[in-house]
Image: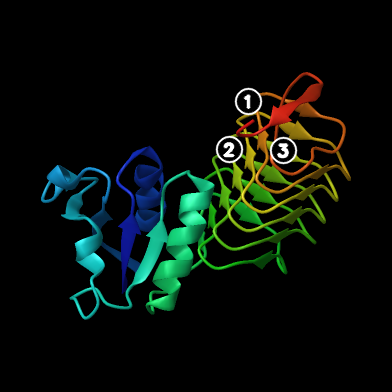
Amino acid sequence: MEPILIWGAGGHAKVVAQTLRRLPFWQLLGFIDDVTPERAGEAFEGTTVLGGREVVAAGGAYAETAMAIAFGNNEARLALWQEMSARGFTFPVLIDPNAVVASGVDIGAGTYVAAGAIVQPGASLGAQVIVNTGAIVEHDCRVGEGVHLCPRSCLNGHATVGRGTWIGAGAIVRDRATVGENAFVGIGALVLADVADDMLAYGHPAQSIRKIGA
């Protein structure tokens, strides 16, 4: 069994930990929580919150260990991945045994595919993507780095989702539509037209409401 750390100690970290337990070749060493340092030493999901960022200090006991980043903030997840990759940590692809992933799908480092998710032939997933519980990525879709496909969301064939975008739970993106980078598609949205970069979109059918941060 290979040792692995989970960075994050919230709800999504629980989900990833369950997947690791269902895979016979990973030994979960513990969790890192750099948001609430007072949790160091706390029992969590059958192991321990080891502490914060100091746990992976250069030359420490966990140097260059495999790591899963298990929190939803896309921008922060990508930044942490780049930082820790430069320091020698590795980020395996984690696919729950109860997910269905077609052969030949291109999947980037650190991407997580949860239980009940389906990824169909010809699709590609960038690094640090979350394909959450029951989400569907249909054939020939292109999903950029750091995207979060929330539970029960669905990308229809040949859809494209840009880097760092959030697709809300139950949202549906029509075939061949493009959702740009760093966009946010709301819960239950029905995306029938392209969504530009940095745009908030929601509704049924979805409307592009405003630029995020505007």
Sequence-first disc among 1 and 2: 2
- Marks 1 and 3, how far apart in space? 12 Å
Specify the amino acid type for callout 1: Ile
- Which numbered disc, 1 or 3, marks the residue closer to the eye? 1
Classify mark 3: residues with Cα within 10 Å, few (<14), some (14-19) or many (20+): many
User: Mark 1–mark 2 contact, CB under 8 Å?
Assistant: yes
Secondary structure, mark 2, is: loop
Specify the amino acid type for callout 2: Cys
Classify mark 1: residues with Cα within 10 Å, few (<14), some (14-19) or many (20+): some
85 left or right, relative to 145: left
- Marks 1 and 2, how far apart in space? 9 Å
Residue sitting nearer the eye, 2 or 80:
80
Q: Is residue 9 above or below residue 145?
A: above
Report the residue marked by disc 1.
187
Q: Percent position (x, y) of residue 155?
A: 75, 42
Tell me the quarter of the image containing the N terminus: bottom left
In the picture as drawn, the residue positioned furthest to the left comes out as 41
Picture residue at 33% right of the left edge, 78% below the top? 64
Can residue 181 be seen by looking at this rendering?
Answer: yes
Classify mark 2: residues with Cα within 10 Å, few (<14), some (14-19) or many (20+): many
Picture residue at 60% right of the left edge, 67% below the top? 108
Report the residue marked by disc 3.
154
Tell me the quarter of the image containing the C terminus: top right
Q: Which mark is residue 150?
A: 2
Q: Which mark is residue 32?
A: none
